[in-house]
Amino acid sequence: MKKLKFNDVFVPRYRMHLIIILVILIYMCLLTLDIAQITIPAAIIIYAYVLFLTYRKNNKLKERIITNMDSFLFKLKTDDTVLGFPIPSVIVGPEGDILWNNYELDLLFKGINKQKYIENVIHELNEEYDKKFIGIDKEISIHDKHYRLLGNMLNLKRRGKEKQPVLMLYFIDRTDYYRLFKMYDDSKNCVGIVMVDNYEELVQGMIDTDKPQLVATVEKKIREWFAFTGGIMTSLDRSKYLMIFDKKYLRDFVNTKFQILDEIKEVSLTNKIPVTLSMAMVIEDGTNAEKFQNAIATLDVALGRGGDQVVIRKDGKYEFFGGNSKEVEKVTKVKPRVISQALGELIEEASNVVIMGHANSDADSLGAAMGVYRLAKTFNKQGYIVLNDYGVAIEGLCKKILQDDQYKNVLVGENEILNKMDDDTLLVVVDTHIAGYVNSKNVLAQANKVVIIDHHRRSTDAIEEPVLTFHEVYASSASELVTELLQYSEEKIDITKLEAECLYAGILTDTKNFMQKTGVRTFEAAAYLKKTGIDVAAINKAFQNDVDTYVAIADVIRNSEILFNNIAIAICPSGIENQIQITAQAADELLNLNGIEASFVLSVMDNKVYISGRSTGELNVQVVLEKFGGGGHMMIAGAQVENATVEEVRDNLVKVLQEMKG
C-alpha cells in the first residue's frame, strides 16, 4: 500500500479550500457544544472523508498526467525511461504543486523540502516572467552547487476536458563550469600602484644618508605584506611601486582591510611624521597597459581624498578602504604659483569669466568666488558670480556686495548668465568639484572650459575633464586656496576690503574660528587678508545668531541621542526659519559636548532629507555620508537624500555607523 504523504493531500490548489472547510466544521462544533458528543465525531468523519477524496482526486490527476501528457517525455513507451531521465526534471502546476518528478530530482533535493522549494521558485518565476513562462533560463544554487534552470510550458490534455497548462522544469548541473570560470577569473591580473603619499614631508630636514634608509624600510614593509601573492612588485620611483598579482589575492587584502595602512605608520623616523600610503587597485578587463593607466587615474582619486587609503576600481565603480588620517599640509608653495599663472592665461584668453559655487552657497563659496572675480578684473575681464540661492549666514555679505556700485550686476541668476555665455566663456567652479552639487547644472552643461578650485576630498562623480584643477584637500577652505592664488600671482592684485572680508569670512567659517583644520598656510592667508585693513570683529559679529536661532539650535541638541557613547544624532524640526543653517550649526555645537567625537543632524526641506556631519577627526564623516551620495572632507561633510523619510534615513545612518564600528 502506498504511504500517505502530507503533500499528496495539501497541494497548493486544494490547500485553502481544506483550511476553510476545517474552520467551518470547528465553528459548527462550537455552536453546538450542547450536543458535542454527536457533532465532533461527525465533523471528524466528514473532514477525514474530504481528505480522502482530495487524496484520491490528486492521485488520479497525477496518473492522468503521466498517461496523457502530449509532451515528448510522456510519449515514450516505458515509465522507467522517463523516470531514469539523467537530468533532474519536474512537472508542476501553475501554483507550484508537483505533479511529477523523476528519480534524479529526488536525489537533488535530498534533505530539502522539495515542495516548498519548488513553490518559491514558481513564485520568483511568476514575478520575473509575468506568468508567461516563455523561455525560462535562470541560474540557481542548491547544496552549494550551481544549476541552470530551464523550463517551458506544456499543455496537458485530460480526458473529456480542455488542455491544462503545466510547467516542465530541468535542472542542469553547471557546477564544473562555475568552478572553471572562478579559476579563470581568479587568475586574471590585478594591477596596483602603491605610493608613499607624504614622501616630501617625510624627507624634509632629513640628512641625505637617512633618505635611502627610509625608502628601504618602507619598501621592506610593503614587500613583506605583498609577498604571499607570489606577484610582481617593482619600484617606479622613490615613493611609488607597481604591483601585478592574481585577482584572487585581492579578497585576502579586503578581508584584512589592508592592514598595511596601519602597519606602515609604525615606521619610526627622526621627524616623527607617520608614513602613510595611498593605493590604487584595478580589477577590470582589458590589457595590462590599460589597467596601468586606469590605476594611475585611480591613484589620483585616492590622493584627492586625502591619501592614507586604498581605492579599488571595478567596472568603472570605486570601493574605498582606510582614509582615517588627517591631511598633511604641503610645505612647497610652487603649485599655487603655477596654478595662478595658468589660471591667469586662461582668463586672458576668455571672453568673460563666470564663477559658480555649490548649491545653497555659504561664506566659503562666496568668498572664493569674490577672490576669483578680483583675479578676472585684474586681467580686465568681466566677471559674474552665479548665485541662485544662499543661506541666511551670508545674507549680510550679499547685501554689502549689492549695495556697492563697483559690484553692480556681478551677482546674477541662472537665466541671466546663460544669455551672457559663449564658446570662449571660462567657468570657474569653487568650493565643490561634484557635478550634481553646483549652483546651476545648466551653466555647467553650457560651459566649454571649466576650472575647479576645491578643498573637499575627491568624489567619484567629479566634474569631467576640467582644463585646470586646483584641488588640495589639506587646505582649510576654498577661500584659503583662492587667497594663495592672489598672494602668489605674478600680476599685481589690488584686492578690495570687501573682497578680503568675504575671503576671510570663508576661512573663518570652514575652520570654525581657526579651531579646526588649520595649518601654517591658513594663518599666512589670513595675515595677507588682514593687511587690507579688514575689521575682524565686524566679520565675527556678522555671524552671530539671534535669540530664536540660538534657542532652535539648543532644542535640536536637547533632543539628540548618543550612539556608541561618542556619536550624536539629532533631527531638526521641519518648517522652522533658517532650517539649513540651524542643522549645520547644531552639528557643530554637538561636538562641544564631552566625549562626542562625531555628530549628524538631519532635517527635511523641499522633499529632501539633508544630513550635516561633523567630526573631531576620529571618524571620517565623508566616508559615512558618501553612502548617501554626499561628500566633503574628513571632519565636515554633508548629503542630500531624495525619496525617503527622515526616519528611514536616520535608520540607514545608524546601520552604516554600526558596520563601520564593526
Image (tube, grey):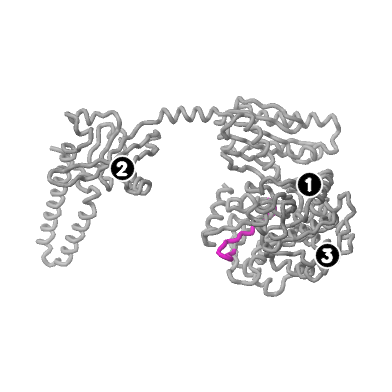
Mark 1–mark 2 distance (CA, rounded to whole Å):
62 Å
Q: Residue furthest bottom?
A: 547
Q: Which residues are magenta?
A: 603-617
- Percent position (x, y) of residue 620? 65, 50
User: Which disc, if any, is residue 498?
Assistant: 3
- Percent position (x, y) of residue 477? 75, 54
Q: Residue at x 13, y 58 (%)?
A: 43
Q: Is residue 472 above or below residue 33?
A: above
Disc 2 secondary structure class: helix
Disc 1 secondary structure class: loop
Amino acid type for the residue under numbered disc 1: Glu
Residue placed under numbered mark 1 in the picture: 329
> Which one is in front in this view, the residue at disc 3 or the one at disc 1?
3
Q: Is residue 85 above or below residue 604?
A: above
Q: Is residue 502 left or right of residue 634?
A: right
Mark 2–mark 3 distance (CA, rounded to whole Å):
74 Å
Q: Say whether disc 3 or disc 1 marks the residue closer to the N-terminus.
A: 1
> Which one is in front in this view, the residue at disc 2 or the one at disc 3?
3
Q: Badge 3: few (under 14), some or many (20 or more) residues near its Cα, within 10 Å?
A: some
Q: Residue furthest left?
A: 38
Q: Badge 1: few (under 14), some or many (20 or more) residues near its Cα, within 10 Å?
A: some
Amino acid type for the residue under numbered disc 2: Ile
Query: Residue 613: within the magenta?
Result: yes
Q: Residue at x 75, y 51 (%)?
A: 424
Query: Residue 401: within the magenta?
Result: no
Q: Is residue 606 left or right of residue 207?
A: left
Q: Is residue 325 left or right of residue 272?
A: left
- Percent position (x, y) of residue 566? 63, 56
Q: Is residue 10 above or below residue 356?
A: above
User: Which disc, if any, is residue 118?
Assistant: 2
The part of the image, by quadrant, that contains residue 167 is top left
